[in-house]
Image (cartoon, grey):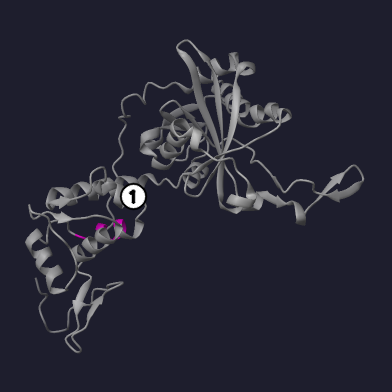
Amino acid sequence: MEESVPTTSEAPAGHSDFDVFQWANAVEEIKNNVSVELFLFNKNYTPYKVRYSEELVRAIRAMFMLEAIEFINKEADKGLECRDYELSDGEDKVIYKIPLERVGRAETLIHLIENEYKDIAYFTDNEYEFKRIKGIVARFTYPGDEGQKTFYIAKGLAASSALKGKLSWELNGESFEPLTADIAIKVPEGNETAIIDDTIVIFNQGKFEKLFQYDYKQQVLSEQKAKEIQDAYNLSLPEGLTLNALLEDKKPLVKKLQSVEIGEMKQDQLLQYADEMMLELMTDEQDRIIIMDDKDLGMFVNLLNEDYFVSPVNGKRYEIKSKKLLDEPEGEPPRG
């Protein structure tokens, strides 16, 4: 049976105090004094600097910044609300907010831009290939009471949004001419995601989840299962690595764990099972099970789910990819 996902109205510290309407009003007042810089980022969330002409600055401000703040200010008079993302239910006239720290890929992207700026390369299609690009993010800065203030507006970019110069024409008046650029891209219309200080503001839930591959239900289930496992078993992980981080994005493993009664197989039984299957599940001096990487985690979860067996026919070891519980034979009482 699939576990229900708990919801909470308690927002993390520093998150519930954020007022997106106040932010939009403040930016509206200084919109002409905001500087902008563009970055592309790939499917690994590695950012690339982008050079652009001064003629594009006004268009960038309009398509990213002004589009967002004008939507907020206009819709605020019509009942627009900003709620915690954890309470999202696809309502109309609602945008959402979530702490940046909860969305690992977004946090990584912003961290790289803010802290590794000098090492970020400029994008060229010859070297990095546009087809690997996942999104575009504009960084806006403006003077505040306590120094420079920064916010980001991010949008997804599909590979189909790019036109190769060699394969495309441009219509100039009444005449078709070769596209002079190596690549032309179409920037998506509509608001998607803003990152302001330590808060992400979500205008389009589906596009946000796709852009940063974020699944709230999956996240909560991962956290639940990580806690249950750590309460039931003594584990040893490398410094800085958590079980929850390893489970993140491992939907098949988390789904498998939903059908496992965590703790039913005791630690000594699990280790004995691993020995019988001749698996390299290691322990340290304190008899803690060592989980170094995805491979160790997968083996550990498979052991919990009893996915290994030795054939009584040929004595070979097998890993079961899927299990289907058989009905009890007729005439025999249920076991267990």
Which quadrant of the structure image shows residue 96? top left
Q: Residue furthest right?
A: 174
Quadrant of the frame with the C terminus? bottom left
Q: Nearer the viewer, residue 260 or 242?
A: 242
Which quadrant of the structure image shows residue 191? top right
Q: Nearer the viewer, residue 123 or 21?
A: 123
Mark 1, residue position: 248
Q: Residue at x 18, y 85 (%)?
A: 315
Magenta residue check for 258: yes
Read off the magenta span. Answer: 254-260
Quadrant of the frame with the N terminus? bottom left
Can you give x and y, in whole percent of width and height, for residue 47 in the image?
Answer: 52, 41
Q: Residue furthest front?
A: 119
Q: Is residue 169 left or right of residue 89?
A: right
Q: In the image, is residue 46 above or below residue 21?
A: below
Can you give x and y, in whole percent of width and height, for residue 30 in the image?
Answer: 59, 14
